[in-house]
Amino acid sequence: MKFFKVILFATAISAVSAIVYFGVLSNNSSAADGRNFNAGRIIDDAVFTNSSSMSVQDIQNFLSSKVTCDTWGQKRSELGGGTRAQWMNSRGISAPFRCVSDYYENSSTGQNNYSKNEAPAGSVSAAQIIYNYSKQFNINPQVLIVTLQKENGLITDEWPTPKQYSEAMGFGCPDNVAPGAPACDPSYGSFSAQIYQAARHFRGYIDNKSGWWVPFNTGNNQIMWNTAPTNCGSGTVNIQNRSTVALYSYTPYQPNQAALNAGYGLGNGCSAYGNRNFYLYFTDWFGSTYSDAYNAQFNAQSPLSEPFYPGEPRQVFLQYKNNGSARWYDDTSAPAGVNPVHLAASVPTNRQSAFSYSWPSSGRPNFTFTRVYESNGTTLAANQHIVEPGQIAKFEFTMTPPWNINLGTHREHFQPVLENAANWSMSGVAWLDITVVSRYSAAFHSQSPAPRLMQNNDVVDNFIMYKNSGTAAWYDSTSTPAGYYPTNLVTAAPFGRNSQISMGWPSKQVASNTFSAVYEANGVTLASNQHIVMPGQIGRFSFKLAANANVKQGSIREYLQPIISGSPNPEMGALSWVDATVDTTTHVAQFAGQSAMPTLTRGAGSPVYIQYKNNGSARWYDDTSVPQGFSPVHLAASAPTNRQSVFSYSWPSEGRPNFTFSKVYEADGVTLAQNQHVTEVGQIARFEFNVTAPWTVNYGTHREYFQPVLENANNWNMGGVGWLDITVKP
Amino acid sequence: MKTIQNKKKNKKIIIVASALTGLLLAGGVAYAARNYFSAPQASVETQAEDRTIDLSPPTTEQQDAGNDAKEDFIDRLDEEDNGSDTSSVSISISSSGQSDQTYQMRTIINTIDDTGTCTLTMKSAGQQEITQSVGTQSMGSYSVCKGFDVPASSLGQNTWSTEIKYANQSVTATAKMDVKL
């Protein structure tokens, strides 16, 4: 039983705690106090016209939070008559009874889902309707929501009647109607029409356009305490802004002190509650009806559909609405001691922008307003250097992408700031997405057939043609004007790579720096200028390819790309390549004869020769004919390789009897070839040289091996090992 | 019997204890739900950091005030469906003051009327009487005279006894005030 008592005690404590928590602490301890109601300044213009305060979803979430709908009227009616369903049925109204959070209506026809299970075609939610008209007339949707509540309690009503929708804002429902006339004008008899007319009238009262005859104005006004038949009279109210004018023009009564002392409750016989309840509901649900002193709301920006180009400045603008209660000054209008409002690069604060080339400072695009508009964003304000609350400032400035900027999209944040003030932040962070592209663009057009490169053999001519698909002219090294960059064809993937098969290029990285031809867009007709490729024309780069002796056999893909040489943004696309096949099975030597075997005495020499036939597929060069980058064919002492011969006294080196061909014969071995320093395939090269017996050599016969080699090449071995038997006698 | 009675007692204790434990658990779940699941939805930040939207259910006071507005609305509709007494139609001078070179007077007529007439009469000792007539305009829930803009030069620095009379085919109403310049 003790345990049972403990449980009971704990339960009691928990229950009390829960009651305290849910019943007391959840009450809004900072509820609005009617005694703070300022009759001349119920709400500030910036708050009243802040149409961006809520999204549709925000409105829907809010409406849903404020009501738990008794859709089928099951609870007891507060108006008597049994249940709510019974009360409704007695008036010919059938369930479902739609709350505002569930209400849908077709704004054109007024058809809605009240008493229906499904929403009619073309209908939208009440949240959407509120949002639409708040945007159309630039009225804070919170103002419309609060007006709905103060007119007939629709926002919190768990079982509203159809008339609470058709007369939701009380628009078209005068205090007095002629006998027989409807209480409310049926031409405004839908929720959409009510919201539309209320928003439209709020805007009309604010703008005070000609022909509206708005009954109140800023300054002193006589505003009644209650409806005329009560004979309560009126009191003077010094109205300070147009939004307060609008509220009184919509509901032309002011609350007396009894009403203001009563919170949401009742005052006395001369109390009116409309504007008091507006103030209380707005403050409790959405915060203060007063705006910050300095608050900026993003309004508009320049369209940025076209890209930016490196080095090219372009004008852009950002517009901000003065959503605060203080006046904005720029550098030309700020009185002494008043901080001006500047547009600043932001995120992070005081960021230095890369696009700031022409700005007064790298963090401030502009120190003055370019334009000041009235709240409609169109009409120029009287003073172009002061932005009154509700007016719109336009900051126009230049964005210049630097030459070395990375191409792509850069998000540049900005916000107005109160310069040099401790409370500098005015909100309103906005951004411009600056997409930077190059004016230079190339598209591959065509190229020569894939070459077959004979190692250490012929040089092959190649070409690649590119179309100028950009908007800037291409110049080559012969035509580039001062301040421009030439277009070169270079090795790519990666850039600056040394080519293995370059031959006669300006460098191993640059295949060509001149156009070999420039064609019109058809690729056939030669252009008038053969060194400038205008947009749409086609430039041809010619270059040579050759495989030196160190290039491995097989396929080589040589990546090439046209670039703007020297530019910080050199790339222009059109990565292309040449697939070359390298044939290395080309240097084969076949022994083709030799001189008689020499007999020497110590210190004596004798001329000898060895002949080799070019039995491969590549041309042989000697030292006098070898092109740059190729390897010559030398006769070498052999077995072992690079052996130093003792008979080499007169040779160029101890392992090389000769660096040149002595004779070159046609295949018959008799007829001299036309070129005595190039051995074509099938021809025979003769290497003549002297062998000299040193004083220290042993007497007897010495077998000296020789073979031709491809000097300094990986594939140096050409076969054709031969020998001379040299006899040394006393 | 004794044994059986004890078993019944124990059974009751178990039932009560289980119920209380269930209540405790439910309370705990409710508390956790409020703190850990509902709390993030308590407010939504908007653009201005100091402005929040209250997403909690309406307070009793707010609910009651809404119900009062609804009852007034329904009562008023019921009354007006039966027609109003036209003798309660009135006009009031809502604002008057000088703006630039004109003295402006604006009015409110507490009925809907696009076809009425408003007549302004201003009298001052030794001054020529000023009279203007304009039509009426509906503002949705009430009407206004289409504005009286009197040249300030014609008023001088005098006190004017001012009367605005509204009339249509079936009703008239008058508002009076003294204008001191």
Image (cartoon, rainbow, N blue to C red):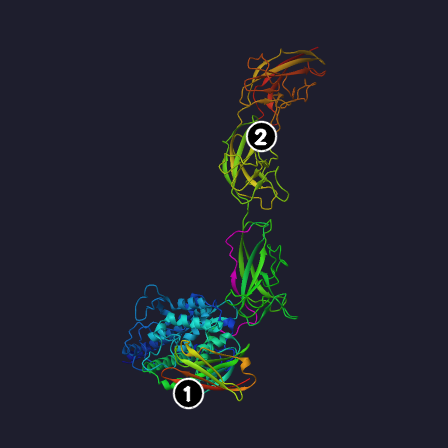
In depth, the one of A673 and A104 nearer the eye is: A104
Q: CA distance from mark 2 to mark 1?
A: 112 Å
Q: Report crowding for label 1: few under 14, some 14 to 19, many 20 or more residues within 10 A (C-alpha).
A: few
Name the side, left or right, on which A103 lies relative to A630.
Answer: left
Amino acid type at mark 2: Asn
| On-image quarter of the N terminus of chain B | bottom left
Residue B84 placement (x, y as % from top left): 35, 84
Name the side, left or right, on which B111 lies relative to B149.
Answer: left
Mark before the other along the chain sequence, 2 or 1: 1
| Residue at the disc numbered 2 | A550
- Residue lying furthest bottom: B125
User: Magenta: predominant secondary structure element?
Assistant: loop
In depth, the one of B82 and B169 nearer the eye is: B169
Residue A585 placement (x, y as % from top left): 53, 25
Q: Which mark is residue A230?
A: 1
Per the image, is A490 magenta? no
Q: Which chain does the residue under circle 2 lie in?
A: A
In depth, the one of B90 and A475 nearer the eye is: B90
| On-image quarter of the C terminus of chain B | bottom right
Amino acid type at mark 1: Thr
Q: Which residues are magenta?
A: A287-308
Name the side, left or right, on which A117 lies relative to A648.
Answer: left
Tell me if residue A330 can be seen. yes
Q: Report crowding for label 2: few under 14, some 14 to 19, many 20 or more residues within 10 A (C-alpha).
A: some
Residue A1 placement (x, y as % from top left): 38, 80
Quarter of the view holding residue A122: bottom left
Q: Secondary structure at mark 1?
A: helix
Per the image, is A290 magenta? yes
Residue A583 placement (x, y as % from top left): 52, 27
Tell me if residue A347 can be seen. no
